[in-house]
Image (cartoon, coloured by chain):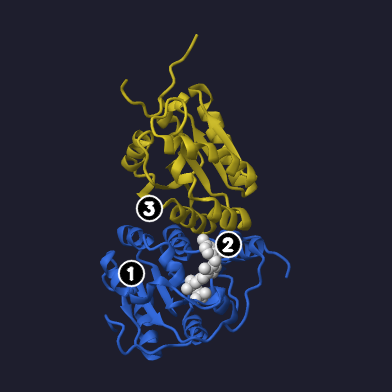
Amino acid sequence: MTETLPPWHEIVLNVFKANEVKLITYVPDNVLKPLIQALHADPYFTCFATAREEEAVGILSGAWMAGLRGILLMQTSGFATLPNVLASLPCAFQIPVMMMISERGTLGEFNVGQAAVCRTMRPILDSLAMEHHTVSRLDECEMIVDRTLRQAIMTQAPAALILSPLLTGGKVVAR
Amino acid sequence: MSGTTHNLKRMYRFDLTTRLVAKLKQEEAVIGGIGHSNFDLWAAGHRPQNFYMLGSMGLAIPIAMGVALAQPARKTFALEGDGSLLMELGCLTTVAAQAPKNLIIILFDNGIYQITGGQPTPGLHADYVAIARACGLTTAAWAADEVEFERMLDNALATDGPHFIGCKLDSQGPKAQTERDPAQIRDRFMRGMGTKKNRTLG
Ligand SMILES: Cc1ncc(C[n+]2csc(CCOP(=O)(O)OP(=O)(O)O)c2C)c(N)n1
């Protein structure tokens, strides 16, 4: 018997609540649109866009040290702007900056720039020794997101969740 | 208060930082940016509510904004150099959009990257107060001298912000060098913010 699961963005929103992740900063991505919309609509969350992803890493670091948990939502290209600030702020100071990355550049990408930048993402995460997991199945979504956030908080270490097009459908172009 | 950079006195960063710290009676948070901003914050006398940035150039204002959002009742200062602000100018729009009432930005504008050898920044013809205003921080102003700096601090401590205070600096270097131990800096700051409560030795 298979139970019907809610869409990925509903699962993610509920896991944020369960972990008291209240501050949502983002530079938008098309795939993240339903999640961003739902977060804006829910008064539990403080949700806003920043001009750059780097800024959001600063905001989340300050907020966490002062007692407010948050997460940064972005796309692959946004993550590629971050290695310097990740290495010198959350990694060096042991601050659990949490990130959710919509994976562009793979499984049917139409933009060659996105495809190239996508290949840098996991090597950067690995070289920063940062915990990261890719969510590709709806039935694993809750556990991976929940456990990753919990571990980040408990170990005071930054972490990244990558949302695969296998989960979200990705961004597709008409043939 | 001045809207232009003509006739502004060039002030000494350590002196301004000391004047600021002397006014902090309510455990206000202070984030010292990369460059010599955090050095003089350290030199002015360590407080548990001080956070010293050791990298992440340009993030003093965002870090302070995060603290301000987390603790709306606590006044929170960002001390940022002009070179650093240039690297993250867009953050002024984010500050203006969210408008945290308890955030106070102090810009230390010496026109150079002092810590890396004193090279002039490309902001030679830039007016950072005008930029801040144009981003929506409409009460941004330059401090003409030390007396006015103190008056602007009093106002910022007594009224809702976000506030932006620009200071033109002379070319004197920092008074001391911050002790570089990020995990300890973060731990002490969290205790200063009341987010870690257990007593520690020492
Ligand atoms: C992204 C990045 N680029 C360059 C540097 C090197 N760097 C460190 S501090 C600094 C200058 C800071 O200038 P400013 O904020 O004006 O402060 P000042 O040194 O004048 O006190 C530079 C260029 C760096 N740390 N990070």
- Closest to the camera, between mark 3 and mark 1, is 3
**Figure colour of chain A:** yellow
Image quadrant assignment for residue A131:
top right
What residue did someone put label 3 on?
A50
Label 3 – label 2 distance at C-alpha: 24 Å
Q: Is residue B34 visible?
A: no
Q: How many marks?
A: 3
Asked if residue A83 lies left or right of residue A108, the reply is right
Q: Secondary structure at mark 1?
A: loop
Label 3 – label 1 distance at C-alpha: 19 Å
What residue did someone put label 2 on?
B190
Q: Nearer the viewer, residue B68 or A108?
A: A108
Label 2: few (<14), some (14–19) or many (≥20) C-alpha neighbours in 10 Å: many
Q: Is residue A146 visible?
A: yes
Task: Name the mark on residue B161.
Answer: 1
The residue under label 1 is which amino acid type?
Gly
Q: Secondary structure at mark 2?
A: helix
Depicted A97 relative to depicted B21: above or below:
above
Q: Both on one chain, marks 3 and 2?
A: no
